[in-house]
Image (tube, rainbow, N blue to C red):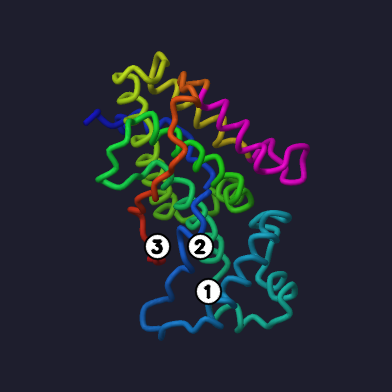
């Protein structure tokens, strides 16, 4: 097995926005002691998250209040507080789900014996598609970093470190097998992280390219950065391994 990307290198990299993995993370579990949710309760929680994500994206974390969320929903504060402790828990739930979705895209089942470049091609496509699909949640994770609790930021950093380590390991394995061509692993990984990770600074969902076209073009750009030829890649994807369960607030 190739050595993973060293932690001191991974720590230099920017955390990514947080997938093409739909429903990778279900609704965050309720606080300890609460009874199991009915489907109606789950739907209400999801509605709160959807409205809050839109408001956070448009007005920022500081500029969005629980009163604004309630007004948009047409409910009172107790309605929101039944499902979430406060505004911080709402934003952490949104950021965590987006992060897990995007940062699990380089995970593959232990019995997946396909060549490294084939898995890498699939993982890169999933990564880009995830960032596009979860664009608002990903953007939020970047913009509100200073407002997140230190322990929560540490959890996001762990996700990012694991992602970059998996990415670097697949790249090095592919290079040893002669299917990839690039010079320095850490520089290339950091460059790829910058291309996708800072998409929130330039991507606009209502822009010139439809989402599917953007995913194709951006994935092709990443392929070129590592010398990966699309013609060498199998079109049959495997289900990714999911090693990060939904997070409960501590």
Q: Residues within 10 Å of mark 3 (few under 14, many from 20)?
A: some
Percent coordinates x, y for residue 27 in the rendering? 48, 69
- At numbered mark 1, what does the secondary structure look like: helix, strand or loop? loop
First along the sequence among labels 2 and 3: 2
* Quarter occupied by residue 218: top right
* Camera-nearest label, 1 or 3: 3
Residue matched to label 2: 93
Q: Is residue 111 above or below residue 79?
A: above
**Tag 1–tag 3 contact (CB < 8 Å):** no
| Main SS category, magenta section | helix
Name the residue at the top extreme. 183
**Tag 2–tag 3 contact (CB < 8 Å):** no
Which mark, residue 247?
A: 3
Magenta region: 200-223
Q: Residue at x 25, y 45 (%)?
A: 111
Percent coordinates x, y for residue 107 in the rendering? 36, 44
Q: Residues within 10 Å of mark 2 (few under 14, many from 20)?
A: many
Towards the viewer: 232 or 134: 232
Q: Residues within 10 Å of mark 1 (few under 14, many from 20)?
A: some
Towards the viewer: 205 or 11: 205
């Amino acid at each position: 097995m190739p050595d993973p990307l060293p932690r001191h290198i991974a720590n230099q990299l920017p955390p990514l926005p947080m997938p093409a993995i739909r429903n990778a993370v279900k609704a965050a579990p309720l606080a300890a002691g609460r009874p199991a949710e009915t489907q109606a309760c789950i739907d209400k929680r999801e509605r709160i998250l959807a409205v809050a994500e839109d408001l956070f994206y448009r007005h920022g974390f500081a500029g969005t209040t629980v009163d604004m969320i309630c007004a948009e929903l047409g409910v009172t504060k107790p309605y929101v507080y039944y499902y979430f402790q406060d505004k911080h828990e709402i934003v952490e739930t949104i950021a965590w789900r987006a992060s897990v979705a995007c940062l699990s895209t380089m995970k593959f089942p232990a019995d997946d014996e396909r060549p490294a470049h084939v898995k890498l091609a699939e993982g890169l496509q999933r990564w880009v598609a995830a960032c596009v699909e979860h664009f608002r949640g990903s953007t939020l994770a970047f913009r509100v970093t200073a407002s997140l609790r230190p322990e929560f930021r540490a959890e996001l950093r762990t996700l990012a470190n694991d992602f970059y380590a998996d990415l670097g390991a697949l790249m090095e394995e592919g290079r040893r097998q002669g299917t990839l061509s690039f010079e320095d692993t850490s520089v290339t990984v950091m460059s790829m992280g910058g291309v996708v990770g800072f998409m929130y600074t330039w991507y606009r969902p209502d822009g010139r390219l439809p989402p599917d076209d953007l995913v194709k073009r951006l994935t092709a750009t990443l392929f070129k950065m590592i010398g990966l030829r699309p013609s060498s890649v199998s079109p049959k994807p495997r289900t990714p391994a999911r090693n990060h369960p939904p997070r409960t607030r501590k």
